[in-house]
């Protein structure tokens, strides 16, 4: 694995709400710009949460989300709609330090592939497609994109990266179960999500249920093995001020619904929790 940094830290955040999860990743992105450390974070979600990519048009109305008991948030990265529930989410933040986009993806994918191998899953990077088969506006797991990780041609890990002149943030979902077809039902569409094959899952790949702790341990162990060095835990308190600074953005309906499909009326609140 090409190193993204001389020193790494790890952070197990456990389960959080959508706004907090995105604010923590954003705070880590800020931290990376002024640090020689990279951070591997692992986290989950307290409630089913739909996330829109930063530039994606919202095609689901708040009433459908409220009816289904699904929260909503907009990510600080690009990509398409994701339902976060039966998954383990990772993020990597690091200073750019001359590292290009392709190199950073290869380094992070090497870590993910090593972790999946520890679980007994043989995954590969998706090749470049000449043209997408999924329709415009399809959900993230409708088909794999270049460099995303697949099993049997179906996407297992969906990732997105944000970069500026100083730092990078890459985060993504490792599916335990395939609940992504719920996105189609939230949109009022019938049949399988986008008419495409189901996503790959760890349960499907291994033939048994897989829990959060197994994936977290595989990721952290793969990192330690690649570096041949201990990786000290990051104290979440170090991020408290950064999280507090970014949290209002991810709670703000003006951010969440800033690109809205004509069929989706702008809602008065971000969270659909009662």
Image (cartoon, rainbow, N blue to C red):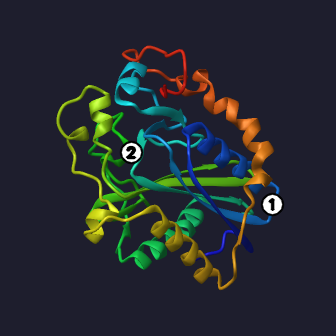
For the residues marked 1 and 2, what is the alpha-carbon distance in whole angstroms?
A: 31 Å
Position of residue 247 measured from the top left corner of the image (x, y, whole percent): 68, 35
Horizontal side of 2 relative to 88 (left or right) equals right
Closest to the observer, 75 or 11 = 11
Seen as rendered, the residue at the extreme bottom is: 228
Q: Can you give x and y, in whole percent of width and height, for residue 184 in the image?
A: 28, 34
Counting from the top left corner in percent of width and height, residue 88 is at: 47, 57
Judged from the image, the secondary structure of the residue bearing numbered disc 1 is loop
Q: For mark 2, does the 10 Å Cα neighbourhood hold few (<14), some (14 to 19), or many (20 or more) residues? A: many
Q: Earlier in the sequence, mark 1 or mark 2?
A: 1
Q: Residue furthest front?
A: 274
Please tell me which residue lies in front, 258 or 85.
Answer: 85
The picture quadrant where one finds residue 134 is top left
Farthest residue, direction left: 191
Give the residue pinned by disc 1: 35
Q: Nearer the viewer, residue 243 or 79?
A: 243
Q: Residue at x 41, y 33 (%)?
A: 70
Q: Residue at x 33, y 38 (%)?
A: 138
Q: Can you give x and y, in whole percent of width and height, for residue 23 in the image?
A: 66, 42
Is 221 rendered above or below residue 171? below
- Asked whether the viewer can see residue 117, the reply is yes
Within 10 Å of disc 1 (Cα), the crowding (few <14, some 14-19, many 20+) is few
Q: Quadrant of the N terminus?
A: bottom right
- The quarter of the picture where residue 62 lies is top left
Q: Which picture quadrant has residue 126?
A: bottom left
Judge from the rendering whether residue 49 lies leftward or rightward of residue 243; answer left or right: left
Local SS, label 2: helix
Q: Residue at (48%, 26%) from the top-left corner? A: 272
Q: Are marks 1 and 2 in contact (CB under 8 Å)?
A: no
Look at mark 2 in the image and give the residue it sits on: 140
Left/right of residue 167 with respect to residue 44 in the rendered view: right
């Amino acid at each position: 694995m090409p190193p993204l940094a001389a020193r790494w830290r790890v952070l197990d955040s456990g389960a959080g709400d959508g706004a907090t999860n995105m604010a923590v990743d954003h705070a880590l992105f800020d931290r990376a710009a002024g640090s020689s450390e990279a951070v591997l974070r692992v986290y989950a979600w307290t409630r089913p949460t739909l996330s829109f990519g930063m530039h994606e048009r919202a095609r689901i109305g708040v009433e459908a989300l409220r009816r289904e008991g699904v929260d909503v948030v907009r990510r600080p990265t690009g990509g398409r709609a994701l339902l976060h529930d039966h998954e383990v989410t990772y993020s990597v933040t690091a200073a750019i330090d001359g590292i290009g986009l392709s190199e950073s993806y290869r380094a992070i994918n090497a870590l993910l592939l090593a972790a999946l191998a520890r679980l007994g899953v043989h995954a590969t990077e998706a090749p470049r497609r000449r043209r997408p088969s999924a329709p415009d506006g399809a959900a993230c797991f409708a088909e794999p994109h270049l460099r995303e990780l697949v099993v049997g041609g179906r996407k297992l890990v969906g990732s997105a990266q944000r970069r500026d002149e100083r730092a990078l943030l890459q985060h993504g979902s490792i599916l335990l179960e395939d609940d992504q077809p719920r996105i189609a039902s939230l949109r009022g569409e019938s049949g399988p999500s986008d008419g495409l094959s189901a996503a790959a899952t760890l349960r499907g790949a291994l033939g048994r249920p897989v829990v959060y702790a197994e994936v977290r341990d595989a990721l952290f162990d793969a990192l330690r093995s690649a570096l041949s060095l201990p990786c000290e835990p990051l104290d979440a308190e170090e991020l408290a001020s950064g999280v507090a600074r970014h949290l209002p953005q991810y709670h703000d309906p003006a951010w969440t619904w800033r690109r809205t499909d004509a069929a989706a009326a702008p809602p008065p609140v971000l969270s659909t929790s009662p």
